[in-house]
Image (cartoon, grey):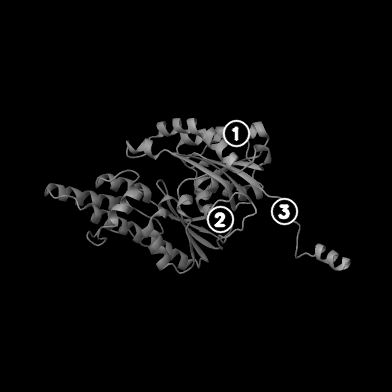
Amino acid sequence: MIDELSKTSQSPERPLAQPAIRILGIESSCDETAAAVVENGRVILSSMVASQVDLHAQFGGVFPEVASRQHIRTIYPIIESALQQAHIGLGELDAIAVTRGPGLPGSLVIGINTAKGLALGSGLPLIGVNHLEAHIYSAWLNWPPVSDSTATITTPEPRFPIVALIVSGGHTELVFMPDHLHYQRLGATLDDAAGEAFDKVARLIGLAYPGGPSIQKASEGGNPRQFSFPRAWLEDSWSFSFSGLKTAVLREVRKLQEQNRELPVADLAASFQAAVVDVLVGKTVRAAQKLEAAEILIVGGVSANQALREAIQAQAPCPVHIPPILLCTDNAAMIACAGHYRYTSGQRDPLSMDVLPNWPLTEV
């Protein structure tokens, strides 16, 4: 009996448990101040987000100086709350990951300088994270958050090779990912990002900021075929363009106003949304087919759009992974997750690290 137990304990099928790696993530690239603690790149021990949406609604978009000031007010309380929620102290962490770019320069500086101060005071390694890479890695996070690290992970890891569509207020990119931390940009927007187009069109038809949720809600009672808005397919290219679509909506609105007709807001919203979704889904599906992707990822703030979610699920040639709504918009759990893979690959950044407001994913 003793011999049998001895054999079992030495069996290679039962390796010794590896120590947990806990990363503190800090996000301040735009108008969300966020902090989170993630274990082993998968388990969310805490995730706190302070939104500035109400502050910027009066401007119809993000006002950079206001965003920076608000980050200063909230970043330390948010970090403290994230550590308390995770029941962990700085000394129990393995590293601090922070958004280095892309983003608003003033907002990025607040997060970077805070992370540097914490790293200097604690002696923890500092890891600069690309915001777009972090959106992709939001797909690796288990949901919902847990109170301890013994919870069962139920969210399956995405399988490579992957075609990822990153859609947010500032970015629309189609990326091929053959393995962890390796990216090939297939295409990107030539003008407005999808989220930016949502915001601008929402203003044109009298809807509130942010435009994405407003247009989605308004479109629920509308006819997506009422207006034949253009689709910029840009043949032989994986890139996107939404400027012409935005102009088409503007012309339709002006024509209706000149005729003293009430704007059919629901129909305008539904028709515009359908045009955006058709192009996003069409190009993503074609890329996945051509590159024989094992899985499609849809990430970023616009991935919360229900019409986009339903369309890609219906047309995709392979499994689709879209993070839960709370992980689509900017958060620090995704920064900590990407930071985990950077940390385990050996990345360590110096305290002289500076922000990179226009940091392309392909140059990570």
Crowding at label 3, few (<14), some or many (≥20) Cα neighbours within 10 Å?
A: few
Question: Which numbered disc, 1 or 3, marks the residue closer to the eye?
Answer: 3
Q: Which of marks 2 and 1 is nearer the N terminus?
A: 1
> For the residues marked 2 and 1, what is the alpha-carbon distance in whole angstroms?
26 Å
- Rendered view: 104 above or below 175: above
Q: Mark 3 points at which residue?
A: 18
- Residue 113: image x %, image y %? 56, 32
Residue at the (22%, 60%) spot, across then down: 226
Q: Which of marks 1 and 3 is nearer the N terminus?
A: 3
The kind of secondary structure element at disc 3 is loop
Q: Which amino acid does label 3 sit on?
A: Gln
> For the residues marked 1 and 3, what is the alpha-carbon distance in whole angstroms?
28 Å
Residue found farthest to the left: 259
Residue at the (58%, 53%) spot, across then down: 181
The one of 230 and 304 positioned closer to us in this rendering: 304
Q: Which amino acid does label 2 sit on?
A: Trp
The reply to whether dot 1 and dot 3 touch (C-beta < 8 Å) is no
The reply to whether dot 2 and dot 1 touch (C-beta < 8 Å) is no
| Direction from residue 112 to residue 225 in the image, left or right | left
Q: Mark 2 points at which residue?
A: 140
Q: Mark 1 points at which residue?
A: 116
Answer yes or no: is residue 206 visible. Answer: yes
The kind of secondary structure element at disc 2 is helix
Answer yes or no: is residue 352 visible. Answer: no
Crowding at label 2, few (<14), some or many (≥20) Cα neighbours within 10 Å?
A: many
Residue at the (50%, 36%) spot, across then down: 108
| Direction from residue 278 to residue 266 in the image, left or right | left
